[in-house]
Image (cartoon, rainbow, N blue to C red):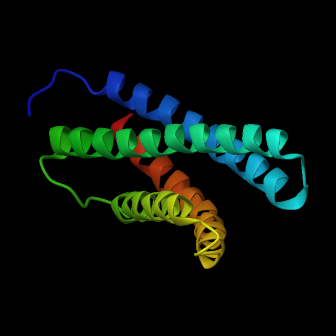
Amino acid sequence: MDLPSFIWLWRIAAWSMGLALVAYAIQAVTGAIMALYHHPRSVQRTWRRSHVTVGIVFVSLVLALLAIGIVGTLGHFGSLGHSPHLAAGLTVVVLTLLSAFSAWRISPQRPYMRGVHVSTNIVLCFALLWVLLTGWDVVQKYL
């Protein structure tokens, strides 16, 4: 792929990562509020709706970052796997999809899925830190 410059792509990636981190933080706050405080049904429904909406945004941003990373790396280097950022990014993608899947499966018949969802999101926090650190090294290569 012969594109003239990838600066525009890295700007999109930087904004997407920043927004993804904000979305993750909002998810943590709304999830904690729903878990720790017992609200009337109508209030709980509002928190849940917010949590789900921001979750969809987070999943979309993570998938967009995956696409940007693949296109940018292939366009710049011609192949993948030039740094640990690939493993970190794929880990974030897998954990994000596992989190979304487990959230979708939470029900009175499967209460254990809530534990899977929360545990996955705790591990996801560390994976996001890993992807941030490795991403910083990648950015330095391009600039």
Q: Quadrant of residue 69?
A: top left
Q: Residue furthest bottom?
A: 112
Q: Nearer the viewer, residue 55 or 18?
A: 55
Eyeballing the image, is 109 above or below 134? below
The image shows residue 55 at horizontal and vertical percentages of 56, 45
Q: Quadrant of residue 120?
A: bottom right
Q: Nearer the viewer, residue 64 or 126?
A: 64
**Side of 57 relative to 46 (left or right):** left
Name the image quarter holding the C terminus: top left
The image shows residue 130 at horizontal and vertical percentages of 54, 61
**Side of 114 relative to 76 (left or right):** right
Eyeballing the image, is 103 above or below 138? below
Q: Nearer the viewer, residue 28 or 126?
A: 28
Eyeballing the image, is 62 above or below 117? above
Name the image quarter holding the N terminus: top left
**Figure disc tally:** 0
**Residue at 20%, 39% in the rendered image:** 76
Q: Residue furthest left?
A: 1
**Side of 10 relative to 4 (left or right):** right
